Structure formats: structure tokens, C-alpha cells
Amino acid sequence: MKLGELTQATLVRRYKRFLADVELPGGEVITVHCPNTGAMTGCAEPGSRVWLSRSTVKTRKYPHTWELIETAAGMACIHSAKANQVVREAFESGLIPGFEAYPDIRSEVKYGENSRADLLLEGESGRVFVEVKSVTLVREHAQGAFPDAVSERGRKHLRELQAICDETTRAVMFYCVLHQGIQSVSAAGDIDPRYREALLQAMVGGVEVMAWQAHITPSEIRLAKELPFSVDPASGQWVAGKAGAEAP
């Protein structure tokens, strides 16, 4: 995914979840939109170099949007909605193996109880519902974790993915790692133990789990490699996109 022309700035502070103040190279401080509802732990340190896009919509109160940040562990994209676009492009290009039989791809498809699948892949073999989550929380040993805050919405998505699995319908929880410093992914059970339990149940119930890291530069974001995933990293049991994973 090409990012277009971005402006460099320095982060002053993030506040009210959707706002941040940044200092432009000339010294001017402006308020920008922060497109991330999570805690953004480690991705909102004052003084960090950031990159901004600018909207051409004249009615926007804050025309700039915060897109990227250079963290101590590596470049990260904090615009969580970008994950859906990056993952769709990867499926469309055939980068992700195992889905060649599902050439037709749609976004934001209604399913379950008032939910929308981020992606729906269809073909002669059936359907694949894909839920995409952006991962930017990095811990010791380059360990990525999701979620970075309690997520009832995330648990709901897991339950609904599990409910639609059958002989012709696959369900995938896809963790799109938008942080260059992450080399493996796990559930953040200490932050949201109920999410961990829901994920474990979903995996046992047939939901496939995949984690892929994106290559991030100020000019583009693209999926680069699959990462190992574990519900509990201490268990030593890792999977990489396998359905019905053995419970740790």
C-alpha cells in the first residue's frame, strides 16, 4: 500500500484518544487526528519522530492524520485501519498461501449478530471470513501482544467467527503486525484475560490464527513475513496459521 506524501514532525503529546499535538520542522505546533482507539503503549512517546498525511477535505477540523512513528524498537504504523487495506492487498496478490481457491474478495461484509467481516474470501470451495487486528504492542524479546486494552468488541468477533465455522466456511483471525520490532505474537492475557480465553476457545473450535509482520517505510506498507503465534508464549507452543491449534 502506497502512503503518498507524508510530512515529518515531532510528537508533543497524545490525548483524548483521538488527538495529538505535534511540532512541525519550522517549530509550529498543530493538533492532528490520531486514528487509534487503543492504549498505544510504546507508540506515543513524546519527542518521537512521526509522519503525517493531510486530507484535502476542507471541512475537516484537523486536516492532518498521524500515520507512522519511529519507536525505540522500530518503525510502527498507528493508523489501525491501514491493517485491513494491507491484508486485503496481500490476499489479492496471492502472497498468503492456502487461499488460492478463494479468488473473490469483498470488504465489510455483514455476518453474525450485527457484525461486519473485515474481509470475505469466496470461491468454489466455499467462504473464508477474515477478521483483521492491528498489533503494535511490543514487549521483551520482541514479543508482540494483542489486545493492548480490554476489548469486548474483540471477544465478540472471536465468538462470531467460531459460530460460522462449518464444512464450507473457514474463519481466520488475522493479526497484522504494524511494528517492525515484533518477531512473534501472543494474546495479552494479563491485559484482557477474557480475550485470551475467548481466543483459546475459538482456536479449539476451528478458527485459524495467522500473524504477519508488515514492512513499513514512509512511502509504503506491505506484508513481509509470517510470524509465530501462541496464546501463551511461556508455554513454548507456537503455531503459524494452523486451524484448530492445540490448546497450550
Image (cartoon, helix red, strand yellow):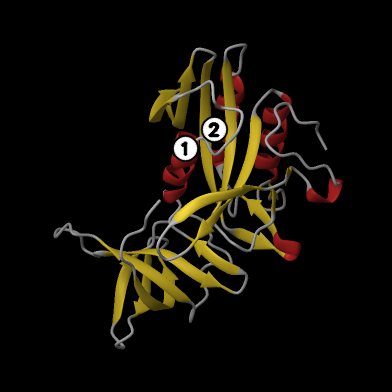
Badge 1: residue crowd in 10 Å (few <14, some 14–19, many ≥20): few
Quarter containing the C terminus: top right
Q: Of marks 1 and 2, which one's residue comes earlier in the chain?
A: 1
Q: Is residue 206 above or below residue 218?
A: above
Q: Quadrant of residue 10?
A: bottom left
Query: Relative to 209, is 164 on the left or the right?
Result: left
The kind of residue on which mark 2 rests is: His
Q: Is residue 135 above or below residue 230?
A: below
Which mark is drawn over residue 93? Answer: 1
Q: Position of residue 52 (x, y in %)?
A: 35, 68
User: Which residue is pictured at 80% across the width and 33% down the height?
Assistant: 247
User: Which residue is pictured at 85% across the width and 47% down the height?
Assistant: 236
**Residue matched to label 2:** 157
Q: Position of residue 224 (x, y in %)?
A: 57, 51
Query: Relative to 109, is 147 on the left or the right?
Result: right
Q: Is residue 36 above or below residue 26?
A: above
User: Which residue is pictured at 51% across the width and 35% down the height?
Assistant: 94
Considering every residue shown, the one lying at the far left of the view is 58
Q: Nearer the viewer, residue 106 or 219?
A: 219
Which mark is drawn over residue 155? Answer: none
